[in-house]
Image (cartoon, rainbow, N blue to C red):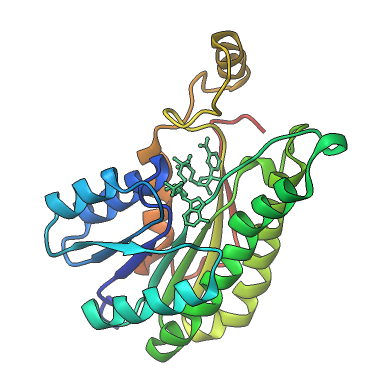
Amino acid sequence: MASPTRNVLITGANGVLGHATARYFLERDASCQVHLGVRERRDQAEALVHEFAGRAHLCPLEVTQPEAWTQALAEIETRSGPLNVLVNNAGCHDDALLASMHLAQWRGVLEANLDAVFHGCQAVLRPMMAQRWGRIVNVASLSALHSPAGQTNYAAAKAGVLGLTQSLSKETARLGITVNAICPGHIEGALPVGWSEEQVKAIRRETPMRRFARPEEIAAVVFFLASPEASYMTGAALKLDGGLV
Ligand SMILES: NC(=O)c1ccc[n+]([C@@H]2O[C@H](COP(=O)([O-])OP(=O)(O)OC[C@H]3O[C@@H](n4cnc5c(N)ncnc54)[C@H](OP(=O)(O)O)[C@@H]3O)[C@@H](O)[C@H]2O)c1
């Protein structure tokens, strides 16, 4: 079978990892169309639209709203045909000890990191089933496997993403649609706000590779999971952590 032309949506594409992933697709697959999911900040995504005119497109998308997904998918289909690659990358954290965590902090993090993945997967299944080909890559976190104190909300949400990924992969396995997750550790340029120089040095020392991931090292794995070559790989949760866990 000929390789399908990839029509890709990356959520949170203005962020560090989303931007690096979009660039990776645009630079390495000259035939793909890349839709850059944005919410508030847009500067990085707009720069890609300018640099890759005609192949990179802004796609306003609040990932917690099912109606926003319906509208975004309709716009994508009009512009470049049905979507066949979804990278659920948008996410956030709002750390606190559970004893003092506000309900809004719990719900906000679950909505942005887990509910959003549910909405996204549900929105893209129909077009992918019609094409009998699709790739879904869910960006979880090492916190799903190795949960630090202060992240009960984020760890639960990202662990939920792994469960969703594995269960959905079984539902779509015979339809040509693969569903995988990645669990990155710390990413250079996207370290938690407020970390002291000492904390950064200590975590780097604990990491067997003695460094954090470059965003493009994570993007490369997303690119592979979204490729035709990754055809026998589904339901996986890949740890990308420089050997930390
Ligand atoms: N940084 C790390 O070390 C690390 C490690 C493991 C996993 N991750 C995961 O990797 C993904 C990307 O992280 P990053 O470090 O690149 O973060 P980032 O630079 O803060 O980017 C996050 C992106 O997600 C978007 N976003 C958040 N909530 C959204 C919502 N409700 N609707 C639409 N867009 C929303 C943000 O948009 P706005 O500009 O509108 O806020 C932003 O573009 C996240 O899922 C994160 O949990 C990161």
Q: Relative to the observer, which residue lies in front, 38 or 84? A: 38
Instruction: Report which quarter residue 64 is drawn in.
Output: bottom right
Q: Relative to the observer, which residue lies in front, 44 or 177? A: 44
Q: Which residue is at 16% across, 61% downward?
A: 30
Q: Is residue 222 above or below residue 118?
A: above
Q: Relative to the observer, which residue lies in front, 119 or 146? A: 119
Q: Relative to the observer, which residue lies in front, 16 or 201? A: 16
Q: Which residue is at 42% across, 76% downward?
A: 134
Q: Is residue 82 above or below residue 228?
A: below
Quarter of the image that includes the C terminus: top right
> Most extreme residue toward the bottom, as rendered?
130
> Most extreme residue toward the right, as rendered?
99
How many marks the image carries: the answer is 0
> Most extreme residue toward the top, as rendered?
198
**Residue 158 point in image, percent of width and height:** 66, 52
**Residue 41 point in image, percent of width and height:** 36, 46
Q: Is residue 205 above or below residue 146?
A: above
Q: Is residue 137 above or below residue 184?
A: below
**Residue 73 point in image, percent of width and height:** 38, 77
Q: Which residue is at 26% across, 48% downward?
A: 23
Q: Which residue is at 50% across, 63% downward?
A: 63
Quarter of the image that includes the N terminus: bottom left
**Residue 225 point in image, percent of width and height:** 44, 60
Horizontal side of residue 1 vs 165, given as left or right = left
